[in-house]
Image (tube, rainbow, N blue to C red):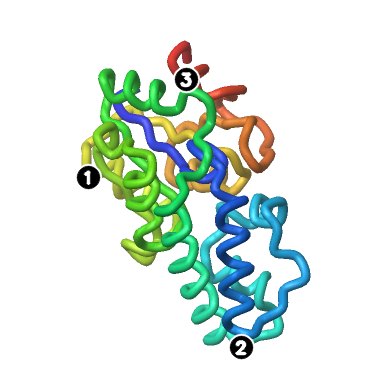
């Protein structure tokens, strides 16, 4: 392995509790009532692209309005996460530190522009991350952004760590082995490897 790429939500931290509260408050300010905007629902949605999440949450709104509302929600969540760091999964800082001593470490997530920066700012883990990409930066989905990282850094044997079937599918499309973080939000079948906790990566 000459490089490792991480997802964020459900893999490095769980921000759904803080994000759910921020989105609920944003919806109230915009006069929007959503029946279920809980952390559990967000765990089912995270990993999808923002337009897809907006279409599910704001299904009664026009597409243009959906995007306006999800942008407002994202601004609110950034502010909330800067005030209060979401809980990291056990030993994530140690794992990132040790992995970065062995190889370059990257982040590729299907999040909005600025979210990975907020993660790095809130956690103080930016020193361990070589580079990161998301659709908000490139306009492309996860598979294309994984390929961008691989090509940009000339990686010959990288791997991706994520927690959803969408992550697995993106890895297949990008031609990169998938390490399934089964402690996260989702499920998948027949990943290349499975970890039950972040520290398992060190042995793998």
Check disc 3 and report its element: helix, strand or loop.
helix
How far across and how far down the image is residue 68, in percent? 50, 81
Q: Is residue 103 left or right of residue 113?
A: left
Q: CA distance from mark 2 to mark 3?
A: 43 Å
The mark nearer the N terminus, 1 or 3, is: 1
Report how many numbered discs are placed on residues in the image. Answer: 3
**Disc 2 packing (10 Å; few <14; some 14–19; many ≥20):** few
The mark nearer the N terminus, 2 or 3, is: 2
Residue bearing the label numbered 1? 152
Residue 113 lies, with reference to residue 59, above or below; the image says above
User: Which residue in the rendered view is the most extreme toward the left?
Assistant: 153
Q: Is residue 71 left or right of residue 47?
A: left
Q: CA distance from mark 1 to mark 3?
A: 24 Å
**Disc 3 packing (10 Å; few <14; some 14–19; many ≥20):** some
Residue bearing the label numbered 3? 201
Check disc 1 and report its element: helix, strand or loop.
helix
Residue at image location 32% in from the left, 29% down from the top: 3
User: Which residue in the rendered view is the most extreme toward the top?
Assistant: 203
Residue bearing the label numbered 2? 62
How far across and how far down the image is residue 137, in percent? 32, 62
Q: Which mark is residue 67?
A: none
How far across and how far down the image is residue 43, in percent? 65, 50
Residue at image location 58% in from the left, 39% down from the top: 163
**What is the quadrant of the N terminus in the image?**
top left
Q: Nearer the viewer, mark 2 or mark 1?
A: 2
How far across and how far down the image is residue 89, in percent? 53, 31
Name the residue nearer the viewer: 198 or 140: 198
Name the residue nearer the viewer: 23 or 65: 23
């Amino acid at each position: 392995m000459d490089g490792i790429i991480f997802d964020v939500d459900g893999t490095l931290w769980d921000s759904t509790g803080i994000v759910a509260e921020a989105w609920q408050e944003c919806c109230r300010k915009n006069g929007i009532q959503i029946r279920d905007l809980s952390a559990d629902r967000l765990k089912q949605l995270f990993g999808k692209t923002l337009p897809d999440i907006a279409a599910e949450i704001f299904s009664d709104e026009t597409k243009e309005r959906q995007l306006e509302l999800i942008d407002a929600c994202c601004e609110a969540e950034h502010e909330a996460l800067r005030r209060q760091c979401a809980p990291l999964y056990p030993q994530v800082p140690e794992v990132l530190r040790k992995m970065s001593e062995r190889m370059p470490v990257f982040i590729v997530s299907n999040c909005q522009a600025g979210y990975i920066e907020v993660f790095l700012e809130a956690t103080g883990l930016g020193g361990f991350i070589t580079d990161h990409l998301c659709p908000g930066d490139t306009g492309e989905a996860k598979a294309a952004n994984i390929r961008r990282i691989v090509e940009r850094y000339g990686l010959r044997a990288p791997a991706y760590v994520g927690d959803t079937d969408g992550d697995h599918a993106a890895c297949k499309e990008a031609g990169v082995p998938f390490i399934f973080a089964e402690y996260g939000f989702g499920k998948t079948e027949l990943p290349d490897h499975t970890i039950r906790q972040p520290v398992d990566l060190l042995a793998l």
